[in-house]
Image (spheres, rainbow, N blue to C red):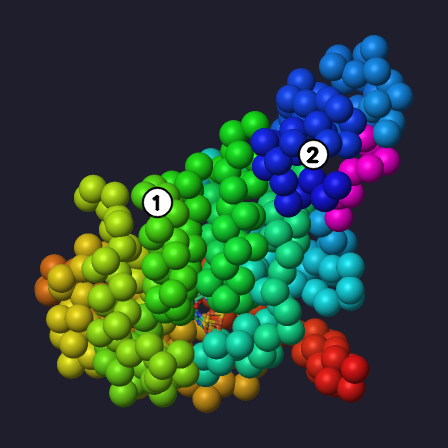
Amino acid sequence: MKILQLTWAELADEFKIRYGKGKYHATAVYREVYKNGNLDFSHVDEFSKSQKLAGKIQSDLVLNPGLVIEEQKDKRLVKFITRLADGLEIESVIIPMATHNTLCVSSQVGCRMGCTFCETGRLGLLRNLAVEEIVGQLYTARFFLGSPIKNIVFMGMGEPFDNFDNVIQAIRVMNDPRGLDIAHSHITLSTAGRIDGIRKLGSLNWPRLNLAVSLNAPNDRLRSKIMPLNRAVPMDKLKESLMAYPLKKSGTFFIEYVLIKGLNDSHEHALELADFLKPLPVRLNLIPYNPLSDSQFKAPSDQDVHRFSGWLEQETIFVRKRWSKGRSVMAGCGQLGNKSELKQKFQNYKTHANTN
Ligand code: SAH
Ligand code: SF4
């Protein structure tokens, strides 16, 4: 029984089938595992008269969030690397906030979208993460690293809509009030613009969940150059899918725009971008480009970022500047997956996978 992929209701169903027991014991187990990080049920009240059952459940439960093999810190920011059961590694980042923390989770090992400015994109896709591997990142951050996580952003490695079903089930588990209890309004899904995913998410009717779209360019010509996905799904199609999305009343989309010096940062680009965004209820997150290990692009100066956001604000676009935290440990957006040993492992795995 892989508890990291089950909601409370699913665990209760499983208990019924396996042990002929239902909600009472499932509630206790779910609480102990997810609220208290406790995997020993022998002292739990609900099992005081059923020690045998406690032992049986304990031996049936599988909880395998992977092994943290490395932690890198930059002030209060922590990037951690988890080794999965098959030896592949993923990265997650704990971003400190005033009272609680935000966890940036990975949804895939690598990514097949191939955005040219993104380190993860360079790796290509190795495989999707299982539900338990996505939820495992939160479990690890809370219980092994002791971090009070209240927000989740799917902005680590991978394109969440390329692994739609597992990401959605992971959100169900993370959201379960009897367990990890992360509210939808505290979860952000970020996509490079998979409109099939946007449509499917819309049909779930989760109006409080936040949706972010990585736009990164003001027109198709430029966007197709840096984000290959745009060649299949041009910007007007993306806009249509956002217009059709059942956003909650007075809700907004988040638009991510990675500002790259000399590429997408001119006054004309700002006007074009504002024009594109005007019919949409959006907040724009302006992210200064984080240089990759051997960059073809340049990072903007602080002044470039202020100037670009000023132009957008003049066009009444709401802008937030995201000064990248964690650059020194390569934990900034788009920097995940840069480590050379990691790259080597990917290479080996790919060769291995191809010869099998
Ligand atoms: N695949 C999803 C989520 C992961 S990428 C997506 O693309 O939205 C998370 C964010 O990091 C995206 O907004 C992406 O545009 C940004 N990003 C990628 N490479 C970057 C880099 N080198 N510098 C700054 N931001 C980057
Ligand atoms: Fe994948 Fe997002 Fe990176 Fe593009 S920006 S390659 S979609 S992780």
**Quarter occupied by residue 105:** bottom right
Nearer-the-camera pick, 27 or 133:
27
Rendered residue at 74%/14% (across/down)? 46
The residue carrying mark 1 is: 205
Secondary structure under tag 1 reads: loop
**Quarter occupied by residue 346:** bottom right
Rendered residue at 53%/34% (across/down)? 176
33 to the left or right of 123: right
Residue 195: image location, x then y, percent: 35, 66
Secondary structure under tag 2 reads: helix
Q: Which residues are magenta?
A: 57-64
Look at the image and tell me in which quarter the N terminus lies: top right
Residue 82 against residue 8 in the figure, above or below: below
**Quarter occupied by residue 355:** bottom right
Look at the image and tell me in which quarter the C terminus lies: bottom right
Residue 62 within the segment the image draws in magenta: yes
Measure the alpha-carbon separation of dots 1 and 2.
27 Å
Q: Is mark 2 within 8 Å of ligand 1?
A: no
The residue carrying mark 2 is: 14
- Mark in the foreground, 1 or 2: 2
Residue 348: image location, x then y, percent: 76, 81
Q: Amino acid at mark 2?
A: Glu
Residue 125: image location, x then y, percent: 59, 75
Residue 326 against residue 28 in the figure, above or below: below
